Image (spheres, grey):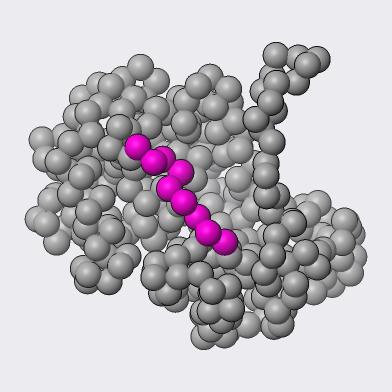
Amino acid sequence: MRENANSNKTIIMIKKPYHDRDGHIWVDGEFIDWRESKVHVLTHSLHYGSAVFEGDRAYEGKIFRLTDHSRRLINSAEHMGYEIPYTLTQIDQACKDTLAKSGLGSAYVRPIAWRGSEMMGVASKNNRTHLAIALWHWGNPFPNRMEGIRLAMADWRRPAPDTIPCKSKGAGLYMICTLSKDAAAAKGFDDALMLDYRGRIAECTGAHIFFVRDGELHTPTNDILLDGLTHDSIVKLAEKRAVKVYRRDIYPSELPHFSESFIVGTAAEVTPVREIAGHSYVPGNICEMLINDYDGAVHGRIEI
């Protein structure tokens, strides 16, 4: 990290950019040297945002809920109006093969599908569909997990379901998430909490959110959000513990009335929250219990 002599902004120097690494990436059915896995600048999905992707995670050589992730990838493409030219079984196997070839036991797995460069313009039907799978080591983004993270309130809102294909994990749908997270970071926060088009609490920029009150869990209604697999896992783990889970509309006015909060996602796993825009929470027993149970689930010690 260094300071730019011409401004007050801090420039983060990345030691190992993602385009310049050792290893291999699975692309359209074959392994390509990591540095040679390139797409053309006139790739349709680059211009029009229709790529779809997944975030899987491998633990000790096994990808957690792999088939569920692959199925969601296929569904995401269908929501975007195209078909991935590989079966569910083939995608699963390609992810396993990529993990095995990497030599990593634990890793973040990124399958991505996109429309190619056969034609440009808004129309897309003559473009070939591609699929690639890359993976890399993924550390803990929040090393002091039980300390909790701080969330700002995002200026951007999750759109209405009749304005976007909200059940697709589409690349273009993350534009406002990037804007919101960058704005939060500029204010010294770790992430941003987004509302939806109706003013309900929705999610963070890349994770779902839970709240705790009187030993029970409350989580936003999922009518406009991506069907989160980590979220689903946490609900099932809580129910195994006989913890009541309420899926309901939650509004910002309720934020002072919860005792704990945490976010969940493939990258974040289960991460407690200590502040949301001035409202304080104390990571406690529920957070710690679900952190431990989720760790047990992803390592095969606990059945979901």
In the displayed structure, does residue 114 sit left or right of residue 217? right
| x 63%, y 70%: residue | 133
Give the image quarter of residue 2: top right
Give the image quarter of residue 180: top right
Assign the N terminus to one quadrant of the image: top right
47 or 122, which lies in front? 47
Examine the rendering and report whether any part of residue 80 can be seen.
no
Q: Is residue 2 above or below residue 128?
A: above
In the displayed structure, does residue 88 sit left or right of residue 245? right
249 or 136, which lies in front? 136
Q: Which residues are magenta?
A: 136-144
Assign the C terminus to one quadrant of the image: bottom left
Task: Tell me which secondary structure the magenta stretch mostly adopts.
Answer: loop
In the displayed structure, does residue 146 sit left or right of residue 226? left
Examine the rendering and report whether any part of residue 246 can be seen.
yes
| x 53%, y 59%: residue | 137
- The location of residue 300, given as percent across then percent down, is 27, 71
- The location of residue 50, given as percent across then percent down, is 70, 58
- The location of residue 175, given as percent across then percent down, is 64, 41
The reply to whether the magenta stretch includes residue 168 is no
- The location of residue 45, given as percent across then percent down, is 76, 58
Q: Is residue 124 above or below residue 11?
A: below
| x 50%, y 21%: residue | 188
Give the image quarter of residue 248: top left
| x 32%, y 33%: residue | 148
32 or 254, which lies in front? 32
Q: Is residue 1 above or below residue 46?
A: above
